[in-house]
Amino acid sequence: MTQTATDSQQPRTYPPPAELAAGAVATAALYEEAAADRLAFWGRQASELLTWDVQPTQVLDWSDAPFAKWFADGELNAAANCVDRHVAAGNGDRVALHWVGEPGDTLTVTYADLHEQVQRAANALSDLGVRTGDRVAIYLPMVPEAVVAMLACARLGAPHSVVFSGFSAQALRDRVDDAQAVAVITADGGYRRGEPAPLKPAVDAALEPRDGAESTVRAVLVVRRTGGEVAWTEGRDHWWHEALESSSPVHEPVSVGAEHPLFVLYTSGSTGKPKGILHTTGGYLTQAAYTHRNVFDLHPETDVYWCGADIGWVTGHTYIVYGPLLNGTTSVMYEGTPNTPTQDRWWQVVETYGVTKLYTAPTTIRTFMKWGEELVSGHDLSTLQVLGSVGEPINPEAWTWYRRVIGGDRTPVVDTWWQTETGGIMISALPGVTSLKPGSAQVPLPGISVEVVDDEGRVLPAGHEGAGYLVLTEPWPGMLRGIWGDDERFRDTYWSRFAKEGWYFAGDGARRDADGDVWLLGRVDDVMNVSGHRISTTEVESALVSHPSVAEAAVVGASDPTTGQGIVAFVILRESAHDTDPAAVGKELRDHVAKEISPIAKPRQVLVVSELPKTRSGKIMRRLLRDVAEDRQVGDVTTLADSSVMASIQAGMQSGK
Ligand code: 6R9
């Protein structure tokens, strides 16, 4: 019996399975140790989990807050920590990646294979002129070369900037320009939903001169994946396989200071321009290794771990690449979508490789729920021991389904809250310690300090229910070190809301229950969360108004049973487009957004309206549009310049159903 409470007041909780608790990596002592001396605790994690060329003597330097320095006098190399030391310890034959391509091709990559590939790739990049400190953009599908490319950059101390391969040429261009990248690593294409999808043309378009200015990119390395035809720019473009073949398999890793930039990863902010989130080496790696090991109760000799994210998101960085490899894990990496070639593809993979730990997003779980349990029941998933969730709040229904159907009514489900900015998991249960409460992310990890506070920055009293803003009250090793090239925006976005207290403002609403467990309530700014991806309303609005038929647009995230939020767009057409069929306009605009940003940003619904609800100062009141999109009674309209606007929008919404 795992049930501890069933009365209607008290949600059911799930204590750790006895066997898992008995052999767990993390015990309750970890909380005590961190509470007794937080900095000493992090110092121990850094020295035990990483191999340093120069051991750090300092833990945290917060004298220039909010610009943190962690382990500042230490020196190390990220790739050597992820690969070389495992080979040196005699584990070269251990599988690092069981890679599964969408068409069904597979590849087994051992740590020794990875070692050779990363050294060759580092030499190839170096031959192309990439130097320590230079930025390299990576625009690749989910192929093993993506991991090799990231590690090769890290080996040189050249920060990578991975751009999700589903993003458009325009989005790639913006990111390459902002980071001033000197090289791009891409592929001819990748497989998505059963079809080869070309990638190289987007790179070619992104590197065209813009407004008379040449791109900063001097070299493009192209992985051959689909074998499709590609245009070639002599002198700039190089095949990855040729460059690696002709490079030496021996490369000395560049030892860098702990605060040397490891990567820049762009994420949506509440204005249209994406923010380049900067992570550095020692602190980020410490948090990646620590959280991966403890949250997934990772036993590297026996576990087969699978994170279903894409390397284009932070989850892929920390929990496909750095965390697992630092811990010497055997991972599964899958190229395609869960429904290709069949809807039970994931369960085939779990069965084939005996996956023990699985990490995915609520939106994926809800999709599996929609497809039905029958797809799962034909597979032996008895190897699974811990399931993880990330990206958005997981509703209790999806949580219990995940545990029951995928986890065979045995496995803990850990709901992990964190952000691109935090670098690694911040709030999560520990599977061998915590009694789980479906729907709540629960407690900060040992070493992490979280509070829920009101508008005035008052901490909600312990033992009482209450809701407010989530803040992080102490610095942590994996914290972002800034926004690339924009210190002011860094201070404004995260550190100004509770400047007096010196707290980090996460931008999420949260509730604390009487037990002190944290429940996340979603973003408090204008950032939507669609299938776990952050998309700003402004970004989609500017894509919409870039279409010749659109005069004005307002976009909201409406709650959606599958994707968490779905994008609903309200558009005012230009006169010239007034006679066009609304259904055709809707389709055209949806496709336009997909092309401009990414298919992920495609509105679920486009509604043509004649006015938008605005305040007298001209601010669009998205709150009211959200009411309409979510089919609720419309809230307070008193601050509207024209209060009749909402009635006409609602009428349009009704007739559009
Ligand atoms: C890792 C990642 C961050 C935002 C974050 C929050 C939401 C992530 C969550 C969650 C509730 C969870 N979020 N995990 N909300 N419960 N377990 O997703 O990073 O793409 O930067 O998004 O995602 O709103 O602020 P990122």
Image: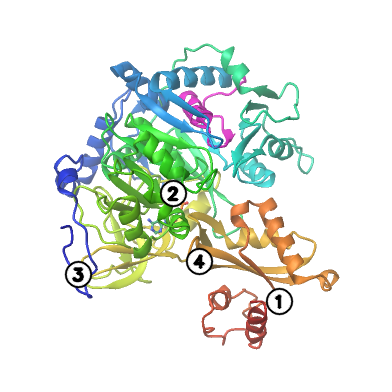
* Disc 4, SS: strand
Going by the numbered disc 4, the residue's amino acid type is Asp
Q: Which residue is mark 1?
A: 609
Residue 344 painted magenta: no
Q: CA distance from mark 1 to mark 3?
A: 49 Å
Q: Which residues are magenta?
A: 128-156
Viewer can see residue 308 = no
Q: CA distance from mark 2 to mark 3?
A: 38 Å
Q: Write the residue at 15% across / 58% down.
A: 1
Q: CA distance from mark 4 to mark 3?
A: 29 Å
Mark 2 / mark 1, whichever is N-terminal: 2
The answer to whether 156 appears left or right of 286 in the picture is right
Ligand 1 is within 8 Å of the C-beta of the residue at disc 2: yes
Q: Which residue is mark 3?
A: 6
Mark 4 / mark 3, whichever is N-terminal: 3
Q: Write the residue at 60% across / 42% down.
A: 194
Q: Which residue is mark 4?
A: 560
Ligand 1 is within 8 Å of the C-beta of the residue at disc 3: no
Find residue 268 and name its label. none
Q: Which residue is mark 2?
A: 421
Label 3 Cα crowd, 10 Å radius (few <14 / some 14-19 / many 20+): few
* Disc 3, SS: loop
Q: Write the residue at 50% across / 31% down.
A: 150
Whether pointer 4 and pointer 1 mark residues with C-beta atoms closer than 8 Å, the reply is no
Please identify the quarter of the rendering in which residue 621 is found: bottom right
